[in-house]
Image: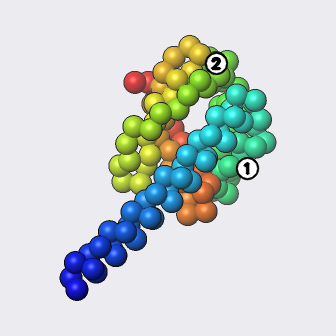
Amino acid sequence: MKYIALLLICFTVQCGLAQDASTYENVIKIFQEDFNAQNIDAIFNMYTSEMQESMTKEGVSSFINGCYGQFGSIKNITFVETAEGVYSYKVKFDKTILAMDLQLSANGKISTIQFQEL
């Protein structure tokens, strides 16, 4: 009986983690497409309302246009690890490779996004 309960718990946790990973994969794919298309409105709408308030559409526009101008388009995004609810990726641009930390809200909106040099 203990083993059945343990198996059910493991299965439930694994399904939850797989769902999170799937949500992150979808958001990453859409973000890459919208970034490369310079679709500021679509990227802004991917953010939580708190992020929208703190960054504003003009701030997002400056961020995306600045990154695109400096680094070029995104060629691919590779998952690295998850730590404390933050998913880390390696992002290959035309001109460089950066690390990206991403955290999504419960409804799949971007609550944190940060790029840094490797």
Residue position for label 2? 72
As displayed, is residue 1 above or below residue 115?
A: below
As displayed, is residue 112 above or below residue 70?
A: below
**Which residue appears farthest toward the top when viewing the image?**
95
The Cα–Cα distance between marks 2 and 1, rounded to whole angstroms, is 22 Å
Mark 2: give few (<14), some (14-19) or many (20+) Cα within 10 Å: some
Q: Is residue 26 left or right of residue 4?
A: right
**Which residue appears farthest toward the left when viewing the image?**
2
Identity of the amino acid at label 2?
Gly
Q: Earlier in the sequence, mark 2 or mark 1?
A: 1
Residue position for label 1? 45
Residue visible at 55% across and 63% down in the picture:
106
Residue 68 in picture, x, y percent from top left: 66, 22
Specify the label residue 20 is tagged with.
none
Residue visible at 57% across and 21% down in the picture:
93
Residue visible at 54% across and 53% down in the picture:
22
Count of residue discs:
2
Residue visible at 62% across and 54% down in the picture:
109
As displayed, is residue 95 above or below residue 59?
A: above
Mark 1: give few (<14), some (14-19) or many (20+) Cα within 10 Å: some
Give the position of the N terminus as an image quadrant: bottom left
Q: Nearer the viewer, residue 72 or 67?
A: 72
Task: Classify residue 67 by image quadrant.
Answer: top right
Residue 28 in picture, x, y percent from top left: 59, 41
Judge whether residue 112 can be spotted in this image.
no
Residue 16 in picture, x, y percent from top left: 45, 64
Identity of the amino acid at label 1?
Asn
Residue 59 in picture, x, y percent from top left: 69, 37
